[in-house]
Image (cartoon, rainbow, N blue to C red):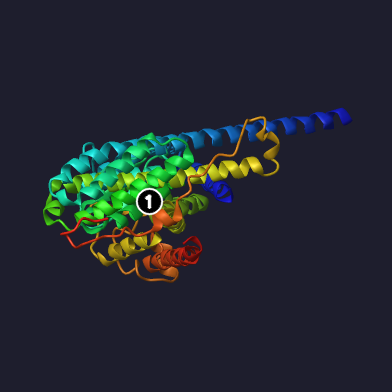
Amino acid sequence: MSEDANLFAQQEANRRRSNWVVVGFIVFFAWVGFGGDLAIALLTAEAPPDAYHHVIPFIGAATTLFAGGICWYSWRHGAERVLWATGAWEIVEPATPEQQQLVNVVEEMAIASGLSRPRIWIVPDDDPNAFATGRDAQSASIAVTEGLLGRLSRDELQGVVAHEMAHVRNLDVRLMTLLAGMVGAIALMSDGMGRMLRHGGRIGGRSAGRGGGRGGGNPLGLIVLALWLVTLIVAPVVSRILAMSVSRKREFLADATAAQFTRNPMALAAALEKLSAATGATRSISRGAAHLCIVDPSPGLLAAREGFLADVLASHPPIRQRIIRLQGMGYQQAKREAAAQPAAS
Amino acid sequence: MSTIVLLVVLAVIVLWVISAYNGLIALKNQVANAWKQIDVQLKRRHDLIPNLVNTVKGAMDFERSTLESVIAARSRAVSATGVKETARAEGELTQALGRLFALTEAYPELKANQNVLQLQEELSSTENKVGFSRQFYNDVATQYNTRQATFPTLLVAGLAKATPVELWEIEDAAERAVPRVDLSLNKPAT
């Protein structure tokens, strides 16, 4: 019963976090827009009456609308976009024994978790990896790479699929999919704004020069402008760190839930071992969707390293720690069974 | 003043009764649903077995007794009713199938046969599904039983017509035993 309560608490927390992420995202874009308006308004306030005065904050209105649009789009089509970006195709009618096995394993895990069967996708990539995406259990999708299908045994595949089903059940997929859409949008906006500034810099420079001749611009306007620029520069990094930190904690939880589904933590540990041994990068999965995957798709040195920097930048906890925890569960289970055996027979 | 306090307390109690009642009913439906899921998987398993037997029959002619025990266990399982009897019959069927699978390992032409491989994957998946649906059923049923037997939900259990449901116990000795395999091919297996 406490486990039950724990699940609801987890789902509730994820719903709440999803809402906050949306609010934070829109507020951030509003600041980017209206902050820019404010800076320009302050800088043009002392201009001669016939020169341009920035009165209507149309940049703010535009960015806020844009942010709302992105949120709506991530909510409605985020999962589709993530799958589309990886080039995944859906298994409708399994063609090979391998695909049949995957479909069977997903059906088994859907039963074990008591959820409806998610849609199943295959990512054409030789590096082993897997991810889940979607708004809720009804609209969820699970995708695995071709490399994963080829390399794992049935039990190991089951462990990986159970891990993904755990993300679906805990509603991690909702938060993760929203974040994927937003991280992408922020990166896009930062690039676009940077280009615009470089382009618009010449005009700004001319007017600033004129203003300088009149005895300096508005200092408050310059401060706001500086703050605004700093936000634009750090936003992509911060948003990514945020997405990563949100994802790290739930990997441990999903591993534990997966063990509860399969009652076979050792298989997932073995699968993680194989996934970490494959050192190549999953090329078809971009950085923006890294936090969705079961193991970091671009394992640099960070995947194996522990410590503060690795903690902040990695999308996943060090894989060794995850394996050790799973093996711990496995040994405990074996011990319990060994203790129960003589009593039973 | 005191009437207001009384009314508030009454409202709180009524709200609690409603939510506790609804919680119990939801769990009850979940249990029924989980049981249906087991049923679906068992039926699927029963449907697959004749196919498997037909496919391997030719190659395993002298393992007739193993095949027959699978068929017999299947027909017993099909006609079983109630949680306890079904659990026992299905346990026996699992055992018989386990013996059959272990025996097919000794036949290279069966191991290479695409049809057999496919059937084997289907059946072992169905076995797993039976296992997982049983696991889920037991989890939900335990939750339901605990909820209706513990205070304070205990108080509305009668109202929700909640009665303890039977768990699907695994017949320890029978199911945990490793299937005995006789690999000396010239004499029929037990």
Reply above or below: A213 against A316: above
| Amino acid type, callout 1 | Ala
For the question of whether residue B177 can be seen, the reply is: yes
Q: Secondary structure at mark 1?
A: helix
Q: Is residue B53 left or right of residue B134?
A: left
Residue A291 versus residue A226: which sits nearer the camera? A291
Between A314 and A328, the residue placed more toward the observer is A328
In the rendering, at what x and y percent does residue A165 appear? 39, 47
Q: Is residue A299 visible?
A: no
Residue A133 appears left or right of A94: right
Characterize the local packing of mark 1: few (<14), some (14-19) or many (20 or more) Cα atoms within 10 angstroms: many
| Residue A299 in the image: above or below residue B47 | below
Relative placement, left or right, of B10 versus B108 is right
Q: Residue at x 40, y 54 (%)?
A: B174
Q: Give the image location of residue B117, x and y in percent.
A: 18, 49
Query: Where is residue A159 drawn, in percent x and y?
Result: 35, 55
Give the vertical position of A49 relative to A299 (above or below).
Answer: above
Residue located beneath label 1 in the image: A162
How many marks on residues?
1
Q: Nearer the viewer, residue A5 or A295?
A: A5
When the figure is inspected, residue A137 is found, relative to residue A128, above or below; the finding is above
Residue ID at (84%, 29%): B4
Chain of residue at mark 1: A
The residue under the point 15% across, 48% down is B61
